[in-house]
Image (cartoon, rainbow, N blue to C red):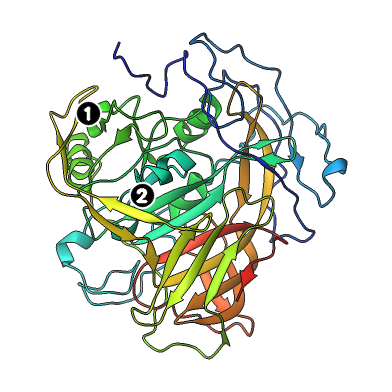
Amino acid sequence: MHSFVRRGFPALILLTAVFVIGCEAQGSPVPRPTWTPRPSATPEPTDTPTPFPTDTPIPSPTARVAAQLVPNPSTVTDVNPAARAPGARDPLIPVFGPFPPIAIPARPANLNPLTGTAANPASLQRRPILVRIGNDKRARDNLWQAGFNSADIVFEELIDALGNIYANTRFTAVFLSNDPPLIGPIRSGRIVNLQLAPMLDGALSNAGASNGTRWIFSQTPMINIDEFFNMPAYCYDKTRGYEGRLLTTGPRLREWMAQKGWERPVPLFGFNFSNSAPSGQAITSVGISKAPWTTPFEWKYDANSGTYLRYSTGAPHIDNSYPVSAKWGSGADCITTGTPTQSQVRTQNIVALFAKYEKTNIIEDSNNAVSVNITLTGAGDAVFFRDGQMIRGKWQRKSEQEFFNLTDTAGNAYGLKPGITWFELVPIGLPLDLK
Protein backbone atom coordinates (compact mmCIF):
# COMPACT_ATOMS: atom_id res chain seq x y z
CA MET A 1 0.00 0.00 0.00
CA HIS A 2 1.35 3.42 -0.88
CA SER A 3 1.50 6.24 1.65
CA PHE A 4 -1.12 8.14 -0.30
CA VAL A 5 -4.75 7.07 -0.48
CA ARG A 6 -6.09 6.07 -3.89
CA ARG A 7 -9.65 6.34 -5.14
CA GLY A 8 -11.25 2.91 -5.54
CA PHE A 9 -10.28 1.37 -2.15
CA PRO A 10 -13.11 0.68 0.27
CA ALA A 11 -11.29 2.62 2.98
CA LEU A 12 -10.95 6.21 1.84
CA ILE A 13 -10.49 9.67 3.23
CA LEU A 14 -13.58 11.82 2.95
CA LEU A 15 -13.39 14.68 0.51
CA THR A 16 -14.62 18.19 1.33
CA ALA A 17 -16.50 20.77 -0.76
CA VAL A 18 -18.62 23.90 -0.30
CA PHE A 19 -22.33 23.47 -0.95
CA VAL A 20 -25.01 26.08 -1.57
CA ILE A 21 -28.80 25.93 -1.58
CA GLY A 22 -30.24 25.37 -5.04
CA CYS A 23 -33.48 25.10 -6.94
CA GLU A 24 -34.64 24.44 -10.47
CA ALA A 25 -37.21 26.42 -12.42
CA GLN A 26 -40.09 24.87 -14.25
CA GLY A 27 -39.77 23.62 -17.81
CA SER A 28 -37.55 20.91 -19.25
CA PRO A 29 -36.29 19.44 -22.49
CA VAL A 30 -37.92 16.34 -23.86
CA PRO A 31 -37.43 13.95 -20.91
CA ARG A 32 -35.78 10.55 -20.73
CA PRO A 33 -37.75 7.74 -19.06
CA THR A 34 -38.51 8.18 -15.36
CA TRP A 35 -35.63 6.84 -13.32
CA THR A 36 -36.34 3.96 -10.93
CA PRO A 37 -33.86 3.05 -8.18
CA ARG A 38 -31.60 0.03 -8.11
CA PRO A 39 -30.20 -1.45 -4.88
CA SER A 40 -27.59 0.83 -3.36
CA ALA A 41 -23.93 -0.11 -3.61
CA THR A 42 -21.23 0.68 -1.10
CA PRO A 43 -20.47 4.37 -1.62
CA GLU A 44 -17.14 6.02 -2.20
CA PRO A 45 -16.53 9.32 -0.41
CA THR A 46 -16.41 12.35 -2.67
CA ASP A 47 -17.25 15.97 -2.02
CA THR A 48 -19.45 16.72 0.99
CA PRO A 49 -18.94 19.07 3.94
CA THR A 50 -17.72 16.89 6.83
CA PRO A 51 -14.42 16.64 8.71
CA PHE A 52 -11.88 14.07 7.58
CA PRO A 53 -12.80 10.75 9.24
CA THR A 54 -10.52 7.89 10.10
CA ASP A 55 -9.82 5.41 7.31
CA THR A 56 -12.61 2.95 8.04
CA PRO A 57 -15.01 1.26 5.61
CA ILE A 58 -18.28 3.09 5.04
CA PRO A 59 -21.40 0.95 5.48
CA SER A 60 -23.92 0.81 2.68
CA PRO A 61 -26.71 3.31 3.42
CA THR A 62 -30.33 2.54 2.78
CA ALA A 63 -31.14 3.00 -0.89
CA ARG A 64 -32.57 6.42 -1.70
CA VAL A 65 -35.06 7.00 -4.48
CA ALA A 66 -35.19 9.58 -7.24
CA ALA A 67 -36.48 13.08 -6.52
CA GLN A 68 -36.68 15.85 -9.09
CA LEU A 69 -35.44 19.23 -7.91
CA VAL A 70 -38.32 21.71 -7.92
CA PRO A 71 -38.51 25.52 -7.57
CA ASN A 72 -39.30 25.74 -3.84
CA PRO A 73 -36.63 23.86 -1.83
CA SER A 74 -39.10 23.22 0.98
CA THR A 75 -41.21 21.11 -1.36
CA VAL A 76 -38.45 18.68 -2.40
CA THR A 77 -39.31 15.18 -1.28
CA ASP A 78 -38.42 11.65 -2.27
CA VAL A 79 -40.95 9.86 -4.42
CA ASN A 80 -41.62 6.16 -4.32
CA PRO A 81 -41.93 4.84 -7.87
CA ALA A 82 -42.98 1.29 -8.51
CA ALA A 83 -40.20 -1.27 -8.78
CA ARG A 84 -38.74 -1.71 -12.22
CA ALA A 85 -39.66 -4.96 -13.96
CA PRO A 86 -36.93 -7.63 -13.70
CA GLY A 87 -34.56 -7.44 -16.65
CA ALA A 88 -35.78 -4.01 -17.77
CA ARG A 89 -33.13 -1.62 -19.11
CA ASP A 90 -31.85 0.96 -16.65
CA PRO A 91 -32.85 4.37 -18.07
CA LEU A 92 -29.51 5.84 -16.95
CA ILE A 93 -27.69 3.57 -19.41
CA PRO A 94 -27.71 4.87 -23.01
CA VAL A 95 -28.70 2.57 -25.85
CA PHE A 96 -25.58 2.07 -27.94
CA GLY A 97 -26.11 1.44 -31.64
CA PRO A 98 -23.83 1.56 -34.69
CA PHE A 99 -21.37 4.45 -34.61
CA PRO A 100 -21.57 7.00 -36.05
CA PRO A 101 -25.37 7.13 -35.90
CA ILE A 102 -25.54 9.81 -38.63
CA ALA A 103 -23.56 10.03 -41.85
CA ILE A 104 -20.40 12.14 -41.48
CA PRO A 105 -20.29 15.34 -43.57
CA ALA A 106 -17.48 15.60 -46.10
CA ARG A 107 -14.60 17.74 -44.84
CA PRO A 108 -10.86 18.17 -45.48
CA ALA A 109 -8.66 15.54 -43.82
CA ASN A 110 -6.89 18.22 -41.79
CA LEU A 111 -10.03 19.91 -40.41
CA ASN A 112 -10.71 19.15 -36.77
CA PRO A 113 -14.47 18.42 -36.44
CA LEU A 114 -14.42 19.52 -32.79
CA THR A 115 -12.75 22.92 -33.29
CA GLY A 116 -13.13 23.78 -36.98
CA THR A 117 -9.39 24.50 -37.13
CA ALA A 118 -6.58 22.92 -39.15
CA ALA A 119 -4.67 20.08 -37.48
CA ASN A 120 -2.25 17.33 -38.38
CA PRO A 121 -4.48 14.75 -40.11
CA ALA A 122 -2.77 11.95 -38.17
CA SER A 123 -3.81 13.55 -34.87
CA LEU A 124 -7.44 13.39 -35.98
CA GLN A 125 -7.26 9.65 -36.66
CA ARG A 126 -7.48 8.84 -32.97
CA ARG A 127 -10.05 8.28 -30.26
CA PRO A 128 -11.05 11.40 -28.29
CA ILE A 129 -10.10 11.28 -24.62
CA LEU A 130 -12.42 12.83 -22.01
CA VAL A 131 -10.60 13.73 -18.79
CA ARG A 132 -12.30 14.56 -15.50
CA ILE A 133 -10.61 17.63 -13.95
CA GLY A 134 -11.38 18.90 -10.47
CA ASN A 135 -12.49 22.41 -9.57
CA ASP A 136 -11.80 22.50 -5.84
CA LYS A 137 -10.79 25.85 -4.37
CA ARG A 138 -7.52 24.36 -3.15
CA ALA A 139 -6.65 23.22 -6.67
CA ARG A 140 -7.35 26.67 -8.11
CA ASP A 141 -5.55 28.57 -5.34
CA ASN A 142 -2.44 26.39 -5.71
CA LEU A 143 -2.52 26.53 -9.55
CA TRP A 144 -2.80 22.75 -9.82
CA GLN A 145 -5.11 22.78 -12.87
CA ALA A 146 -3.57 22.09 -16.26
CA GLY A 147 -4.77 21.16 -19.74
CA PHE A 148 -7.76 23.44 -20.32
CA ASN A 149 -6.11 25.57 -23.01
CA SER A 150 -5.02 22.48 -24.93
CA ALA A 151 -8.51 20.93 -24.96
CA ASP A 152 -10.80 20.93 -27.99
CA ILE A 153 -13.98 21.07 -25.86
CA VAL A 154 -14.64 21.51 -22.13
CA PHE A 155 -17.88 20.71 -20.31
CA GLU A 156 -18.68 22.03 -16.82
CA GLU A 157 -21.44 20.66 -14.59
CA LEU A 158 -22.64 20.62 -10.99
CA ILE A 159 -21.96 17.35 -9.20
CA ASP A 160 -23.87 15.59 -6.41
CA ALA A 161 -26.87 16.69 -4.38
CA LEU A 162 -27.40 16.45 -0.64
CA GLY A 163 -31.06 17.34 -0.09
CA ASN A 164 -31.38 20.62 -1.97
CA ILE A 165 -27.66 21.33 -1.92
CA TYR A 166 -25.12 20.82 -4.72
CA ALA A 167 -21.39 20.16 -4.52
CA ASN A 168 -18.68 21.85 -6.58
CA THR A 169 -18.65 22.01 -10.32
CA ARG A 170 -16.36 19.66 -12.23
CA PHE A 171 -14.96 19.63 -15.75
CA THR A 172 -14.75 17.10 -18.57
CA ALA A 173 -12.02 18.22 -20.97
CA VAL A 174 -11.91 16.58 -24.42
CA PHE A 175 -8.57 16.04 -26.17
CA LEU A 176 -8.22 14.99 -29.80
CA SER A 177 -5.76 17.18 -31.72
CA ASN A 178 -3.38 18.03 -28.84
CA ASP A 179 -1.30 15.98 -26.42
CA PRO A 180 -0.62 18.35 -23.51
CA PRO A 181 2.42 17.72 -21.29
CA LEU A 182 0.26 17.83 -18.18
CA ILE A 183 -3.44 17.19 -17.49
CA GLY A 184 -5.02 17.38 -14.07
CA PRO A 185 -5.83 17.12 -11.34
CA ILE A 186 -7.76 14.01 -12.35
CA ARG A 187 -10.97 13.45 -10.38
CA SER A 188 -13.75 10.89 -10.30
CA GLY A 189 -16.36 10.21 -12.96
CA ARG A 190 -20.09 10.84 -12.83
CA ILE A 191 -23.04 9.53 -14.81
CA VAL A 192 -23.07 12.74 -16.86
CA ASN A 193 -20.08 11.26 -18.65
CA LEU A 194 -22.44 8.77 -20.27
CA GLN A 195 -24.25 11.78 -21.74
CA LEU A 196 -20.98 12.98 -23.31
CA ALA A 197 -18.62 10.11 -24.13
CA PRO A 198 -20.99 8.23 -26.51
CA MET A 199 -21.18 11.13 -29.02
CA LEU A 200 -17.38 11.00 -29.31
CA ASP A 201 -16.95 7.22 -28.98
CA GLY A 202 -14.43 8.49 -26.46
CA ALA A 203 -12.31 7.07 -23.65
CA LEU A 204 -12.96 8.44 -20.15
CA SER A 205 -9.96 9.22 -17.93
CA ASN A 206 -11.00 9.41 -14.28
CA ALA A 207 -9.93 8.79 -10.69
CA GLY A 208 -12.50 6.06 -10.23
CA ALA A 209 -16.11 6.48 -9.16
CA SER A 210 -18.65 5.32 -6.60
CA ASN A 211 -19.67 1.70 -6.91
CA GLY A 212 -23.04 2.69 -8.36
CA THR A 213 -21.47 4.88 -11.04
CA ARG A 214 -18.84 2.23 -11.80
CA TRP A 215 -21.59 -0.33 -12.28
CA ILE A 216 -23.39 1.97 -14.73
CA PHE A 217 -20.14 2.49 -16.67
CA SER A 218 -19.50 -1.27 -16.74
CA GLN A 219 -22.82 -1.92 -18.50
CA THR A 220 -21.71 0.08 -21.56
CA PRO A 221 -19.00 -0.31 -24.22
CA MET A 222 -17.36 2.98 -23.16
CA ILE A 223 -13.59 2.79 -22.74
CA ASN A 224 -13.08 3.55 -19.05
CA ILE A 225 -9.52 4.52 -18.03
CA ASP A 226 -10.42 4.23 -14.35
CA GLU A 227 -7.30 4.94 -12.27
CA PHE A 228 -7.98 1.98 -9.95
CA PHE A 229 -7.69 -0.47 -12.85
CA ASN A 230 -5.24 1.53 -14.99
CA MET A 231 -2.73 2.96 -12.52
CA PRO A 232 0.23 2.96 -14.96
CA ALA A 233 -1.63 5.57 -17.04
CA TYR A 234 -1.17 8.06 -14.19
CA CYS A 235 1.41 9.47 -11.79
CA TYR A 236 1.09 10.93 -8.30
CA ASP A 237 2.30 14.17 -6.77
CA LYS A 238 2.35 12.99 -3.16
CA THR A 239 3.13 16.46 -1.82
CA ARG A 240 -0.45 17.50 -2.59
CA GLY A 241 -3.77 16.75 -0.98
CA TYR A 242 -6.46 14.59 -2.53
CA GLU A 243 -7.69 17.55 -4.59
CA GLY A 244 -4.54 17.59 -6.71
CA ARG A 245 -2.40 14.48 -6.43
CA LEU A 246 -3.46 12.47 -9.51
CA LEU A 247 -1.99 13.65 -12.84
CA THR A 248 -1.30 12.40 -16.34
CA THR A 249 -0.10 13.61 -19.73
CA GLY A 250 -1.55 13.46 -23.22
CA PRO A 251 1.30 11.27 -24.57
CA ARG A 252 1.02 8.85 -21.64
CA LEU A 253 -2.72 8.38 -22.08
CA ARG A 254 -2.19 7.72 -25.79
CA GLU A 255 0.59 5.25 -25.06
CA TRP A 256 -1.52 3.40 -22.51
CA MET A 257 -4.52 3.25 -24.83
CA ALA A 258 -2.34 1.80 -27.59
CA GLN A 259 -0.99 -0.85 -25.19
CA LYS A 260 -4.53 -1.83 -24.23
CA GLY A 261 -5.76 -1.92 -27.84
CA TRP A 262 -8.16 0.98 -27.27
CA GLU A 263 -6.70 3.46 -29.74
CA ARG A 264 -8.34 3.71 -33.16
CA PRO A 265 -9.70 6.32 -35.61
CA VAL A 266 -13.17 7.54 -34.68
CA PRO A 267 -15.40 9.18 -37.31
CA LEU A 268 -16.89 12.28 -35.71
CA PHE A 269 -19.91 14.23 -36.93
CA GLY A 270 -18.64 17.41 -35.29
CA PHE A 271 -20.15 20.90 -35.06
CA ASN A 272 -20.95 23.68 -37.50
CA PHE A 273 -18.34 26.45 -37.73
CA SER A 274 -18.30 29.88 -39.31
CA ASN A 275 -15.56 32.49 -39.60
CA SER A 276 -18.21 35.23 -39.67
CA ALA A 277 -19.62 36.49 -36.40
CA PRO A 278 -23.43 36.42 -36.28
CA SER A 279 -25.43 39.54 -35.57
CA GLY A 280 -26.63 39.38 -31.99
CA GLN A 281 -26.73 41.33 -28.76
CA ALA A 282 -23.44 42.89 -27.69
CA ILE A 283 -22.45 41.13 -24.45
CA THR A 284 -18.88 41.34 -23.18
CA SER A 285 -19.26 39.39 -19.93
CA VAL A 286 -21.19 36.24 -19.06
CA GLY A 287 -21.15 34.26 -15.84
CA ILE A 288 -23.11 32.43 -13.17
CA SER A 289 -23.10 33.52 -9.55
CA LYS A 290 -26.48 32.43 -8.17
CA ALA A 291 -27.51 29.26 -6.38
CA PRO A 292 -27.44 26.40 -7.06
CA TRP A 293 -24.16 27.14 -8.91
CA THR A 294 -21.51 26.68 -6.23
CA THR A 295 -18.37 28.24 -7.74
CA PRO A 296 -19.16 31.61 -9.35
CA PHE A 297 -17.41 32.22 -12.66
CA GLU A 298 -17.25 34.96 -15.26
CA TRP A 299 -16.07 35.00 -18.87
CA LYS A 300 -14.89 38.42 -20.07
CA TYR A 301 -14.54 39.07 -23.78
CA ASP A 302 -11.09 40.24 -24.86
CA ALA A 303 -11.44 41.99 -28.21
CA ASN A 304 -7.68 41.99 -28.86
CA SER A 305 -7.47 38.19 -28.88
CA GLY A 306 -11.06 37.49 -29.89
CA THR A 307 -11.39 35.13 -26.93
CA TYR A 308 -13.18 35.00 -23.58
CA LEU A 309 -11.00 34.96 -20.45
CA ARG A 310 -12.24 33.04 -17.42
CA TYR A 311 -12.44 34.33 -13.86
CA SER A 312 -13.37 32.07 -10.96
CA THR A 313 -14.70 33.61 -7.72
CA GLY A 314 -13.37 36.95 -9.00
CA ALA A 315 -9.79 35.86 -9.71
CA PRO A 316 -8.21 34.95 -13.07
CA HIS A 317 -8.56 31.21 -13.65
CA ILE A 318 -5.07 29.93 -14.45
CA ASP A 319 -3.98 26.98 -16.58
CA ASN A 320 -0.54 26.03 -15.19
CA SER A 321 1.21 23.71 -17.63
CA TYR A 322 4.67 22.16 -17.36
CA PRO A 323 6.29 18.95 -18.62
CA VAL A 324 5.85 15.89 -16.42
CA SER A 325 7.29 12.42 -16.72
CA ALA A 326 7.37 9.35 -14.48
CA LYS A 327 8.64 5.81 -14.18
CA TRP A 328 5.18 4.83 -15.32
CA GLY A 329 3.77 2.04 -13.23
CA SER A 330 1.45 1.47 -10.29
CA GLY A 331 1.86 4.39 -7.88
CA ALA A 332 4.58 6.15 -9.89
CA ASP A 333 5.78 9.55 -8.68
CA CYS A 334 5.34 12.49 -11.06
CA ILE A 335 8.65 14.04 -12.10
CA THR A 336 8.64 17.69 -13.16
CA THR A 337 11.03 18.22 -16.06
CA GLY A 338 10.49 21.79 -17.19
CA THR A 339 9.42 25.34 -16.44
CA PRO A 340 5.74 26.13 -15.81
CA THR A 341 3.82 28.08 -18.44
CA GLN A 342 0.93 29.94 -16.88
CA SER A 343 -1.92 31.34 -18.96
CA GLN A 344 -5.43 32.45 -18.17
CA VAL A 345 -8.09 29.95 -19.18
CA ARG A 346 -9.65 31.13 -22.43
CA THR A 347 -12.05 30.04 -25.13
CA GLN A 348 -13.43 31.20 -28.47
CA ASN A 349 -16.97 29.99 -27.75
CA ILE A 350 -19.24 29.65 -24.75
CA VAL A 351 -22.43 27.61 -25.02
CA ALA A 352 -24.87 27.58 -22.12
CA LEU A 353 -26.97 24.42 -22.45
CA PHE A 354 -30.01 24.52 -20.19
CA ALA A 355 -30.87 21.02 -18.99
CA LYS A 356 -32.88 19.19 -16.38
CA TYR A 357 -30.96 18.14 -13.24
CA GLU A 358 -32.50 15.18 -11.41
CA LYS A 359 -31.31 13.38 -8.31
CA THR A 360 -30.70 9.63 -8.44
CA ASN A 361 -30.14 7.11 -5.66
CA ILE A 362 -26.50 6.50 -6.59
CA ILE A 363 -24.75 7.26 -3.30
CA GLU A 364 -21.59 9.31 -3.79
CA ASP A 365 -20.39 9.68 -0.18
CA SER A 366 -20.97 8.76 3.46
CA ASN A 367 -23.37 11.69 3.92
CA ASN A 368 -25.75 10.10 1.40
CA ALA A 369 -25.12 12.80 -1.21
CA VAL A 370 -26.37 11.38 -4.48
CA SER A 371 -25.28 11.57 -8.08
CA VAL A 372 -27.24 13.82 -10.43
CA ASN A 373 -28.62 12.82 -13.82
CA ILE A 374 -28.46 15.67 -16.36
CA THR A 375 -30.84 15.17 -19.28
CA LEU A 376 -28.90 15.95 -22.45
CA THR A 377 -31.13 14.20 -24.96
CA GLY A 378 -34.29 15.66 -26.43
CA ALA A 379 -34.25 19.44 -26.79
CA GLY A 380 -33.75 22.55 -24.71
CA ASP A 381 -32.78 26.20 -24.65
CA ALA A 382 -29.25 27.38 -25.36
CA VAL A 383 -27.39 30.69 -25.35
CA PHE A 384 -24.32 31.14 -27.56
CA PHE A 385 -21.44 33.59 -27.11
CA ARG A 386 -18.70 34.42 -29.63
CA ASP A 387 -16.91 37.60 -30.75
CA GLY A 388 -18.63 39.62 -28.02
CA GLN A 389 -22.09 38.70 -29.37
CA MET A 390 -24.87 36.74 -27.69
CA ILE A 391 -27.37 34.66 -29.68
CA ARG A 392 -30.29 32.83 -28.09
CA GLY A 393 -31.14 29.46 -29.53
CA LYS A 394 -31.87 25.78 -29.04
CA TRP A 395 -30.07 22.47 -28.69
CA GLN A 396 -31.42 19.08 -29.62
CA ARG A 397 -30.33 15.50 -30.22
CA LYS A 398 -32.16 12.18 -30.33
CA SER A 399 -29.58 10.03 -28.54
CA GLU A 400 -26.35 10.27 -26.57
CA GLN A 401 -24.40 9.05 -29.61
CA GLU A 402 -25.42 12.09 -31.65
CA PHE A 403 -23.72 15.49 -31.54
CA PHE A 404 -25.70 18.42 -30.21
CA ASN A 405 -27.56 20.18 -33.01
CA LEU A 406 -27.25 23.90 -32.24
CA THR A 407 -29.67 26.37 -33.86
CA ASP A 408 -30.90 29.91 -33.37
CA THR A 409 -34.48 30.47 -32.28
CA ALA A 410 -35.62 30.43 -35.93
CA GLY A 411 -34.15 26.95 -36.43
CA ASN A 412 -31.14 28.06 -38.49
CA ALA A 413 -27.87 26.21 -37.85
CA TYR A 414 -25.58 28.10 -35.48
CA GLY A 415 -21.93 28.37 -36.47
CA LEU A 416 -19.35 28.23 -33.71
CA LYS A 417 -16.19 30.27 -34.09
CA PRO A 418 -13.24 28.03 -35.00
CA GLY A 419 -11.42 27.24 -31.76
CA ILE A 420 -12.16 25.92 -28.29
CA THR A 421 -15.76 25.65 -27.04
CA TRP A 422 -16.79 25.59 -23.37
CA PHE A 423 -20.19 24.07 -22.66
CA GLU A 424 -21.77 25.20 -19.40
CA LEU A 425 -24.45 22.65 -18.38
CA VAL A 426 -26.90 24.97 -16.61
CA PRO A 427 -29.97 23.89 -14.59
CA ILE A 428 -33.17 25.04 -16.29
CA GLY A 429 -34.26 28.47 -15.08
CA LEU A 430 -30.92 29.51 -13.57
CA PRO A 431 -30.19 33.06 -14.77
CA LEU A 432 -26.94 34.04 -16.46
CA ASP A 433 -25.09 37.15 -15.36
CA LEU A 434 -24.82 39.31 -18.49
CA LYS A 435 -23.04 42.62 -19.04
**Is 311 positioned to the left or the right of 280 in the image?**
left
Front label number (2 vs 1): 1
Q: Secondary structure at mark 1?
A: helix
Q: Secondary structure at mark 2?
A: loop
Question: Identity of the amino acid at label 1?
Answer: Pro
Q: Position of residue 286 (x, y in %)?
A: 56, 70
Name the residue tied to disc 1: 232
Does any portion of residue 91 appear in the rendered image? no
> Which class describes the residues within 10 Å of circle 2: few (<14), some (14-19), or many (20+)?
many
At x 27%, y 74%, the residue is: 117
**Is 290 positioned to the left or the right of 76 in the image?**
left
**Is 118 positioned to the left or the right of 14 in the image?**
left
Cα–Cα gap, marks 2 and 1: 19 Å
At x 12%, y 28%, the residue is: 327
Name the residue tied to disc 2: 202
Q: Seen from this angle, which residue lies furthest right?
A: 75
